[in-house]
Amino acid sequence: MIRVQREDFDIGVELDRLAAGNHRIGGIASFVGLVRDMSPIAARADHVSALTLEHYPGMTEKKLAEIELEAHRRWPLDASLIIHRYGRLVPGDRIVLVATVSPHREAALAACHFLIDWLKTDAPFWKSEETPEGERWVEARPEDDEATRRWRSSHPSDDQIAGN
Amino acid sequence: MKILYFAWLRARIGCAEEQLALPSEIRDVEGLLSWLQRRGPRYAEALHDLSVVRVAVNQDYVGRDHPLDDGDEVAIFPPVTGG
């Protein structure tokens, strides 16, 4: 399930809902992304007082749905959830929740990792930071591209959990 | 053709969305980008380094040789930074 929203979300409620009524689930893996108060670039270790997330309505939902479908193609998942916020957020605020549900932890954990890596390089969101020097757009990080490239180059069958 | 700009490209061009009638010789993304670069100083400045410019046509990422049609929705934006 995909949700792109301005509002905050309740992690406990979302995870409970994802697993409710399904007793073949062995585990839920989740990743929660938060706004931090420092720039990701070490050389610019100045204070970030807020950030604003812009996105491309329509394409955002389309890309997230494609990424989710790819995770279900690669791993035996019972359910998954991606919630991504947009608008102005302050340090400590939740930005993103990725959760995956599977009979086995390996699939849930790997799929969750895959989803957040792939989302960072494919979903059309952009961050603008507010700092004492003014506003500036966050630059994409080569490490993020590399993380997604690793998933792309790995053969889907290598990632699947055999024999469960 | 509907053209959308996002993030610093929107800010530098000073426009989020515009409807353009393109010259008929523009057939692909490459042609569109070089035509836009010549539209004025704001466009030239925003699009001077195409290595940091991504393009989506009808909400899918495309390469520079992707063909364009009048009814397309073209989005031009920097590398994404969500998550």
Image (tube, coloured by chain):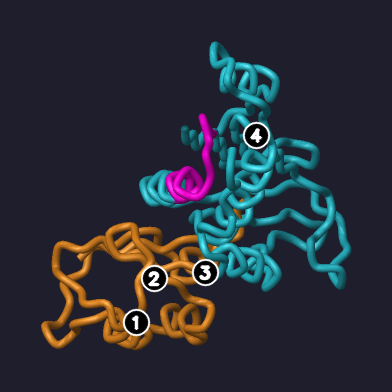
Is circle 4 on the same chain as circle 1? no
According to the rendering, which colour does chain A have? cyan
Say which colour chain B has.
Answer: orange
Label 1 marks which chain's residue? Answer: B
Q: Cα distance, mark 2 to mark 1?
A: 8 Å
Is residue A35 covered in magenta?
A: no
- For residue B16, above or below residue A67: below
Number of the label disc, if any, that sits on residue B78? 3
Marks 4 and 3 close (CB-CB < 8 Å): no
Q: Would you say the residues marked 2 and 1 are in contact, meaning their CB atoms lie under 8 Å apart?
A: yes
Query: Of helix, strand and loop, which one carries label 2?
Result: strand
Q: Residue at x 32, y 85 (%)?
A: B30
* Residue at image coords 60%, 35%: A100
The residue located at (55%, 70%) in the rendering is: A153
- Is the residue marked by circle 4 packed among few (<14), some (14-19), or many (20+) residues within 10 Å? some
B40 relative to A148, above or below? below
Mark 3: amino acid: Pro
Q: Name the residue carrying label 4.
A: A104
At mark 3, the secondary structure is: loop
> Horizontally, is B28 left or right of A126 in the view?
left
Write down the residue under mark 2: B55
Residue located 34% across and 61% down the image: B60
The x and y percentages for residue B28 are 24, 81
Label 1 residue SS: loop
Disc 4 versus disc 3: distance between alpha carbons? 38 Å
Q: Is residue A113 found left or right of A68 in the rendered image?
A: right
Q: Amino acid at mark 4?
A: His
Q: Are marks 2 and 3 in contact (CB under 8 Å)?
A: no
What residue would you read off at disc 1?
B64
Which contiguous range is marked in magenta? A67-80
Q: Position of residue A136 (x, y in %)?
A: 68, 63
Give the distance between the C-alpha atoms of the residues marked 4 and 1, in whole angstroms: 42 Å
